Image (cartoon, rainbow, N blue to C red):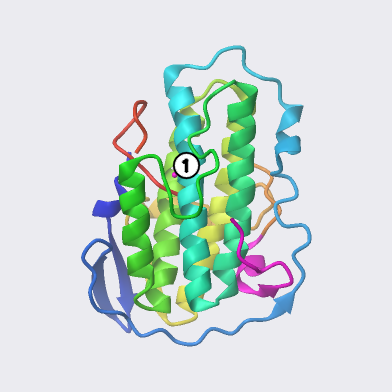
Amino acid sequence: MTQLRSIPSRVSVAGAVVAISFATMTAPLTAAPLTQTATDETALFATTTPSAITVAASHSTLSDAEIADILFMREEEKLAHDVYVALGALWGTPIFSNIAQAETSHMESVASLIERYGLDDPVDDNPVGVFVDPSLQAMYDDLVASGSLSLTDALMVGALIEEVDIEDLLDSIDETEATDVALVWQRLLSGSQNHLKAFTSQLAAQDIDYEPTVLDVATYDQMLSEAGQGNGGHGNETDSDEDHQRGHGRSGDTNKSRQGGRGNGRVG
């Protein structure tokens, strides 16, 4: 799987292509101010709560790879959540706090699978910014540092996280034979599509053309085109990129190194 710390983000800024390594970035980009509009978000992730996945019957047994995916995704979603909490507190931009709330719902859905199959939860009671896996801890530190350079950098961090998350979820969907697990992955995928569109839309508002660095162009374009369609061809998410970009009454702060399975570590 993709190792996030080694991925450069390439964007076109005012016609110039700029490569940014999240581990080595030293100079901030200039961020244009963003316009926020107040709206309501009471239905945010209504279909991704733990109770929503109980309609699917449990698979009697899981493969080692399926178990590794579940455990990894639990902490991977925490990483996305925690980065957004940190960047939201720094920049005060609703998109981060709104998507952090969505990531909380993602974490809870994966936690339901962990409980259902009697697995040990790697997140447990760990606070924001604390991870069991040392590579995820290092990723968190790098991403927050990079996103702290400027608001533009923070938005690019968000887009990159969602790109990697989408790639990982597509792989996990292909791998699992458990209907209940696949249902959760599909719903998380639909959410990540919406999040990716929200971040890239914010960048586009600053005349920045975000170029995918993880997904191939065809998959990237497909994910964006399906965003906001309710199920995105994969699941049944209810949030939209517009919800995340705007200010909401629920925009306050809220609270993924895998050892085994496929790959060397991923995040989303």
Mark 1 neighbour density, 10 Å: few (under 14) some (14–19) many (20 or more): many
Q: Residue at x 61, y 12 (%)?
A: 60
* Element on which disc 1 rests: helix
In the rendered image, residue 83, in percent from the top left (x then y), is placed at 46, 60
Q: Is residue 224 visible?
A: yes
Horizontal side, residue 165 vs residue 11: left or right: right
183 left or right, relative to 51: left
Quadrant assignment, res 158: bottom left
Q: Which is more toward the observer, 29 or 210?
A: 29
Query: In the image, which residues are magenta?
Result: 240-256
Q: Is residue 40 above or below residue 119?
A: below
> Is residue 245 shown in magenta?
yes
Q: Residue at x 32, y 80 (%)?
A: 13
Work out which quarter of the rendered image holds the N terminus and state it: top left
Q: Residue furthest toward the top? A: 60
Report the residue at 77% width, 57% height from top: 43
Is residue 249 inside the magenta stretch? yes
Q: Quadrant of residue 106?
A: top right
Residue 229, given in percent of the width and then of the height, sits at: 66, 54
Whole-percent x, y for residue 149 in the image:
34, 76
Query: In the picture shown, does residue 163 fall above or below 26?
Result: above
Name the kind of residue labelled 1 in the image: Glu
Q: Residue at x 34, y 38 (%)?
A: 257
Residue pointed to by mark 1: 75
Please determine whether, in this image, residue 104 is positioned above or below residue 114.
below
- In this figure, what is the number of numbered marks? 1
Within the image, what quadrant is residue 109 found in?
top right
Q: Taking 262 as reference, is 198 left or right?
A: right
